[in-house]
Image (cartoon, rainbow, N blue to C red):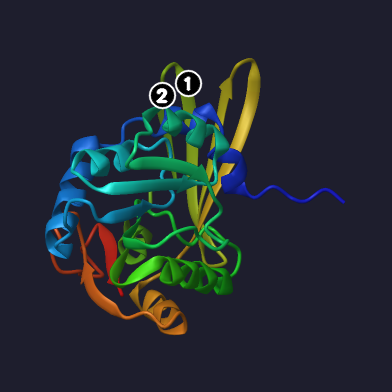
Amino acid sequence: MTKKIEWFQDWFDTPYYHTLYNHRNDDEARFFMKNLITFLKLKKGNKILDLPCGKGRHALFLNEQGFDVVGADLSSNSIIAAKNHENDTLRFYTHDMRNTLEGKYDAIFNLFTSFGYFNDEQTNVKVLKNLKKAVNQNGHIIIDFLNIKKIEKELIPKEEITKSGISFLIKKYIKNGFLIKDIFFEADDKKHHFTEKVQCLDLDKFKYFALRSNLKVQNVFGDYSLNPFDKNKSDRLILILQ
């Protein structure tokens, strides 16, 4: 019996994913990470895990700031690209966050809504337990998630975006506790349809998962400037766990 491929295993490993999201703001991401570095009082030489790391742009930036960085991602194509940047203090490997991690880290970054991909809540607890095992005793786990309460109010059900000559039709909706994005386009003489599916997790859910994982929610922020979280207004839900 053929094992079913999950949406993130399929979509993230295509070149079209990177085409659609090539607008992501590097300056904003670096601003966020600088704020985290300062807030967490990280020191040069500290070990940081970026999971998932994609093609490694954020891991590379962290390494440039003087940290010993490991990037891990399920997408083998992304890791192949990331490995071009490796050096003595920057390494990449393919990894599924549902599996036990290698090494110990002073900070683990889970950035830009890279959580809640799975079909059941128990897997979220499993992932957090894996992160807890991999973080040093006084280290921190940073989860950067969307603010589902604001998303629900402002959801745009349909839009069309053109990138590199490809017209992406995107339909968004909430169903059975998931935020779902259906992506339709034509490229390379084929019609394509991919789906993104993320659990609708709010702050209370994350507190529950942390409790189940024997982690403490130390801080909650609502944007990349690390302003306080407001469930009605904040763009992000950022948690510092220990």
Q: Residues within 10 Å of mark 1 (few under 14, many from 20)?
A: some
The front one of 138 and 144 is 138
Which residue is identified by label 2? 162
> Looking at the image, do the residues carrying marks 2 and 1 touch, with CB atoms under 8 Å apart?
yes
Q: How crowded is mark 2: few (under 14 residues within 10 Å), some or many (20 or more)?
A: few
Which residue is identified by label 1? 166
Which residue corresponds to the image point at 55% horizontal and 28% vertical from the top-left?
185
Which residue corresponds to the image point at 30% horizontal and 55% vertical from the top-left?
47
The front one of 223 and 185 is 223
Q: Position of residue 35 (x, y in %)?
A: 14, 54
Q: Is residue 236 above or below residue 140?
A: above
Q: Which amino acid does label 1 sit on?
A: Ile
Q: Position of residue 86 (x, y in %)?
A: 38, 33
SS under mark 2? strand
Quadrant of residue 143 in the image?
Answer: bottom left
Q: Is residue 93 above or below residue 98?
A: above
Q: What residue type is labelled 2?
A: Thr
The front one of 198 and 53 is 53
Quadrant of residue 176 in the image?
Answer: bottom right
SS under mark 1? strand
Which residue corresponds to the image point at 17% horizontal and 55% vertical from the top-left?
37
Which mark is on residue 198?
none
Q: Where is residue 71 in the image (x, y as percent from the top left)?
A: 41, 46
Left or right, 207 with respect to 25, comes to right
The front one of 168 and 220 is 220
Residue farthest along the right direction in this orientation: 1
Quadrant of residue 193 in the image?
Answer: top right
Left or right, 201 with respect to 48, comes to right
Real-space CA distance between mark 2 and mark 1, rounded to the nearest whole angstrom: 5 Å
Which residue corresponds to the image point at 45% horizontal and 65% vertical from the top-left?
200
Q: Where is residue 234 in the image (x, y as percent from the top left)?
A: 22, 62
Work out which quarter of the rendered image holds the C terminus and state it: bottom left
